[in-house]
Amino acid sequence: MPPSASFDPSYRYDRQVRLWGEEGQASIGTTSACVLGSDSLATETLKSLVLAGVHSFFIVDDARVEHADLGQNFFLQSDDIGRSRAEATLEKLTELNPSVSGRASCQSPTALAQKDVEKLATFSVVVSANQSESIDTKFAEVLYNIRVPFVCIKSYGLIGTIRICIKEHTIANSHEENPRPDLRLDAPFKTLSEIINETDLNEMTVEQLRHTPYILLHFKALDVFRKHRNNENAFPETTNDRKEIQQILQSFRRSTEHSGTKDSENFDEAKAAVMRAFQKTTIGASVQSILSAAESSDSTQPFWLICEALRRFVKFNNGLLPLRGTLPDMTSDSNRYTRLASVFHEKALLDAQEVLRLTREVEKERGVGDVISDDVCYRFCKNADRIRVQHGALLDYTHETKECVRKVKEMSIEEQSREEKVDSATWLLLMRAVGRFRKEKGRFPGTNGVPVSIDAQDLKKRVEVLIRESVQEEEEIKAILHNVTDSAIAEMCRFGAAELHVISSYVGGIASQEIIKLATNQYVPIDNTFVFDGHSQESSTFKL
């Protein structure tokens, strides 16, 4: 490795680049995060962000290091007792990655919420770690309106939660698993049609036939399929139609291929790919809704600029998205595969160039400069069928508590009793009750030396109050209370607001990955609530 390799992002973040791509890593490198709090959960989240290579982070916390912190936060030592916890964790975190800069403020998140919350508009994301509901609500309201992602994370005993609050999040590449290949069997472009027309299976030698790419076999089988129906536009749409294509492919084999040896591997590939390859080239509902929204939008955000250009491209391209331009692996001789790959790549490049031209038109119409680069446009077109838009919801504990109650109501009492575990929705409702308990009594249940049995009764009353605020019918209230078992309520009190490092580490790691998704506009973030139950090691997501 060269001496400078350790400072080169392509070496330092090699594994990440394979996941996010160079453009994703570049986005991570410009991300700035503000974290409210410096406890174990906040530190574990920041640790993963610092190692990922964010540009900078800012810790806001007025707490001092206490003995209890040493058992919860591995970044703190006995020498740190009495120091500012934000500054102590800052020192340790910046040692992990010299290319990341960090700052700390000893003011409380409450003070920041009262006077300087608007300054957070300069950050890429704001994270609230184990803050009170009133602080979360204040920050969420401001950040939601200025479109800064707000990630609210909590670690309470064996329960961890993540709530993402963002008005709108655009995704340039959702990284859909196992996407169908974009082969355009129903709509071949000119240069591809030329190769198809030049291909004559009957004139080939056995050796040439054995090394014919299966995409060409598919096109030839489609020709026969259409002749059988006397319809030049016929296309297999049912399972029986595709089975007929497989039979036609089988008929193409020469007598020496019927043995099914490796010599006929391309035919085996062709047969196996029929069900996925023979699908009409259409635009998915989610992408179509984005294009429709782009038509009525006057946004100058890069995503919406290029979406409007994409909409115009589709309108004049027979309803087709830009060609993806990649071919799956297949058995073939080098010459024919290289030629096929070349025409697919060239067509994709031409489509992207046309989208870029249309983008320049949109930019001019909306009075912005050339904000979309050639590379960005090409990548966008390549993943055009995988763009997504998430519309979030403002953090509203009153509304979300009602949703929790509704989900607990829908639970099957018999199923919960049989499995002897508490549903994630119940834990989430209990977290809301703990928040109410903290707000009204100034402490967490199970703390200050109060017996668990006493606080459990107190917490149960608050659970009932929350349910009654959401449900009117007495029978329904009793049924929901039946699902919130006394043992689960007592467990929340036994936690005593303890922050277990193993839970904080797990939840912080997930939170950091969700933050990176938001920063890179890649993959699909949680929409919008995540709950981890350390008792069963199970996680659930809800949209509240």
Image (cartoon, rainbow, N blue to C red):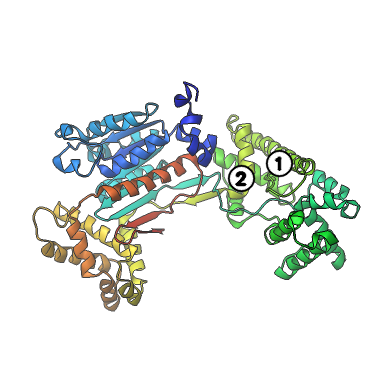
Image coordinates of residue 11 in percent, x first then y, are: 49, 30
Q: Residue at x 18, y 32 (%)?
A: 80
Q: Quadrant of residue 409?
A: bottom left
Q: Secondary structure at mark 2?
A: loop
- Label 1, residues with CA under 10 Å away: few <14, some 14-19, many ≥20: many
Residue of label 1: 348
Q: CA distance from mark 1 to mark 2?
A: 11 Å
Decide which of 480, 206 is in the foreground and name it: 206
Image coordinates of residue 157 in percent, x first then y, are: 24, 54
Image coordinates of residue 377 in percent, x first then y, are: 62, 37
In the rendered image of this protein, does residue 386 appear above or below residue 372? Answer: below
Q: Quadrant of residue 445?
A: bottom left
What amino acid does circle 1 point to?
Ala
Q: Which mark is residue 383?
A: 2
Q: Secondary structure at mark 1?
A: helix
Q: Is residue 522 visible?
A: yes
* Callouts 1 and 2 close, C-beta under 8 Å: no
